[in-house]
Image (tube, rainbow, N blue to C red):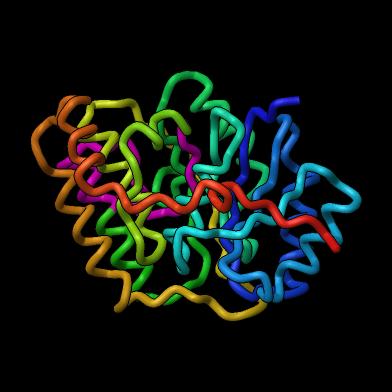
Amino acid sequence: MTPRVSVVIPVYNEGPEVVRHLERILREVLLPAEILVVHDMPEDTTVPFVHELARTDPRVRAVLNTYGRGPANAIRFGIDAARAPVAVVTMADGCDDPRQIDDLARLVDRGVVVAAASRYMPGGQQVGGPRFKRMASRWAGKTLSIFARVGTRDATNSFKAYDTDFVREVGIESNTGFEIGIELTAKATRLRRPVAELPTIWLDRQLGESHFDVGRFMPSYLRWYFFAFGRRMSDEQMAARWADKRPTPAPSGDRDREETPA
């Protein structure tokens, strides 16, 4: 059966802590789904635990990213490997609420190209996390919503659903961190494509260590923040932009590489 939603989860040495989160996703996602756990290296400590789950639930796939290391490349690879018309990006640390994956996917089914889980709309909340990161994210979301009219008050949140055809049309240029969420929201805004949101409660991770580096990723976020304020672009202009900036493709034999348990 072709899945209706592909859940893309970039991981980096999550180890056994990933199991609880994956089990919650498997419980809460009721739509026909595939769960793509995307890792950068075969020796990632997450992989054995993903293989163990895959033995009992065929929805789970461990996928080796060949686009280059880092979360942006892992997410780009995961969306390219997705078999469903909707891809939902969520983190491996349990910060996101998996009960909302179906609702986000249904928004895309109804015609939006980006569906955002929003911490900053009525009913949403952010619990924990570094103070500067919270303030910067909230300020960016508010100003983008009011002045650029991006369709969501939480453009920087990574927990989003995407129309996979739209993503492949406009491309993903990010190659650093988690700025893909704001990049695709900004591109949808410049093309006047519909973006929607629903409230979410984000909880800072309770176990393990965050790999988010504010100083390292901030320039990339600012690039797409200012991009959202540009003039309307045509489909042809966006396609030409992507053709000019498209990264060198991975070898065809590795592009959709799925690891099977030993």
Residue at the (67%, 70%) spot, across then down: 42
Please say if 213 is above or below 187.
Answer: below
Q: Is residue 42 left or right of residue 209?
A: right
Q: Name the foreground residue: 11 vs 138.
A: 11
- First to last magenta residue range: 141-163
Q: Is residue 99 left or right of residue 217?
A: right
Please say if 107 is above or below 35.
Answer: above
Q: Name the foreground residue: 210 vs 12.
A: 12
- Point out residue 261 in the picture as x, y percentages from the top left corner: 83, 60
Indicate yes or no whether the magenta region holds residue 181. no
- Point out residue 122 in the picture as x, y percentages from the top left corner: 43, 43
Residue at the (45%, 65%) spot, across then down: 68
Q: Quadrant of the N terminus?
A: top right
- Point out residue 240 in the picture as x, y percentages from the top left corner: 18, 35
- Point out residue 62 in the picture as x, y percentages from the top left corner: 70, 56
Q: Quadrant of residue 188?
A: top left
Q: Quadrant of residue 43?
A: bottom right
Q: Is residue 223 left or right of residue 123?
A: left
Residue at the (42%, 54%) spot, across then down: 157
Residue at the (39%, 77%) spot, across then down: 213
Indicate yes or no whether the magenta region holds residue 148. yes
